[in-house]
Amino acid sequence: MRRFLFILLIHCAVIQLVGADTIPPLSLGGYGEAAYTRNYYSDQWQRYTNAEKYRDASSHGRFDMPHAVFYVGYDFGKGWTFGSEVEFEHGGTESAIEMEAEETGEYESEIERGGEVALEQFWLQKSFGRAFNIRAGHIIVPVGMTNQYHLPTEFFTVYRPEGENTIFPCTWHETGISIWGRTKNWRYEVQLLPGLDADRFDSEGFISGGAGSPYEFKIANSYAGLLRLDNYSVRGLRIGVSGYYGHSFNNSLTKNAKYQDYNGAVTIGTVDFQYRDARIIVRGNFDWAHLEDSEEITKFNKSMPSASPSPKTAVASDAVATGVEAGYDIFTHVPRMKADNQRFYVFGRYEYYDSMAKVEDGVMDYGWCGKRRMAVGVNYYPINEIAIKAEYSKRFYTSKYNDEPSISLGVVWAGFFRH
């Protein structure tokens, strides 16, 4: 990480010293989010198993840095380009070693800040033309709408849409190969990837924990394929579909012979769209995912040792997520603001998602995994790259559980320093 930041500083210094006209085709950019939320419900993990006890719980507040991403790209010429993204989630991580006077001078390691740091993209690409490109390395897996359009200026809510962010890895990134291209009205992408790891599937997140690896390598005993198509035939409208298929059970580090006949096939189908004109933006998605052998995966994960990275919980056979949001720019009626390219969207969003939409006979169904959520709020864009967001949202459950209202504020940005 220090080496990455050092290189980034050197690039910026070169730009200042020799001038923009003589700089190689270097791209620098990124995006980031800072958020505050007040949740008017209990934050105890038992709030679903003993809902009545927490019906009148006090509210709690949280500050967060959901994502801070820095991008570096380079055009080598002759169709060869490089791209990379380093992502800090929830502020990154910090640790320190201290000598504790209260504990007879013992050295003690402490975690001072939670979060994650990840290499989200790191690829080389050869372009043969607008319609045919080959990209290899660590790449984004464009399953669903949020993985393909995950910048904070590409959705209205303070946090990423909950449904896709719950049941899928998000942002989903794997090491693999991509072939993609664009014609007048179509964009296509085909990818070959390592399969997910069924060890880390769980009740609330379905397959979302199965990407990446907790080890210093990615297990790739089984593989997966993806196809995504986007159509732009109607002015202002984009309609996209994506499909994914791959085995997951063979990618366990510790799988025993008892389960050798099960493959844990993951099948995903999604549809999403966006319509945009001078005043209105409407977005929507529908996602369905199916996991074969979920009962055997549940048994296997629950049998794993406590030190394993598996959540060791029940896993469903099917999950769904669907949602729609719409925003209207009221500054189109304010000539001074419109002339200054400022925008002020009033928006609403509704979504339904269930990480245990269907379970096999031997798997327990947790009813609280099915959620309906609504959100209303505003997005103010003083310039195109920056937005200030505010929203009121509420998750709705069946009567057995307590609803979960909250208010959130956020400041986000996305753009290039040099491109």
Image (cartoon, helix red, strand yellow):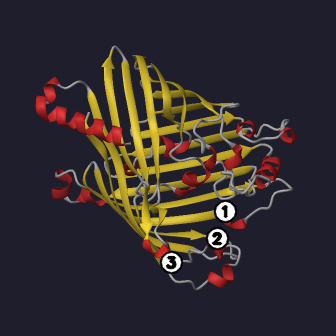
If you read the primary sequence from the N terminus, does the residue marked by circle 3 or circle 1 appear first?
A: 3
Q: State whether residue 376 is above or below residue 400.
A: above
Q: Amino acid at mark 1?
A: Gly
Q: Are marks 3 and 2 in contact (CB under 8 Å)?
A: no
Which label sits in the foreground, 3 or 2?
Answer: 3
Image check: 197 left or right of 162?
right
SS for dot 2: loop
Binning the other alpha carbons within 10 Å of mark 3 as few (below 14), some (14 to 19) or many (20 upward) gives: some
Q: Are marks 1 and 2 in contact (CB under 8 Å)?
A: yes
Q: Quadrant of the N terminus?
A: top left
State the residue position of label 1.
370
Picture coordinates of residue 184, whole percent (x, y) = 41, 24
Check the picture and name the quadrant holding the C terminus: top left
- Name the amino acid, label 3: Tyr
Q: Is residue 126 above or below residue 204?
A: above
23 vs 402: above or below: above
Give the numbered dot on residue 42: none
Please tell me in which quadrant of the rendered image residue 73 appears.
Answer: top left
Distance, label 1 to label 2, CA atoms, is 7 Å
Residue 40's disc is 3
Q: Position of residue 36 (x, y in %)?
A: 39, 68
Disc 2 designates what residue? 397
Confirm whether residue 26 shows in the render: yes
Q: Is residue 121 above or below residue 95?
A: above
Of 281 and 78, nearer the camera is 78
Q: Does residue 233 show up? A: no
In the rendered structure, which disc, 3 or 2, sits on the residue that comes first in sequence? 3
x and y, in percent, of residue 397 in the image: 64, 70
Q: CA distance from mark 3 to mark 1?
A: 19 Å
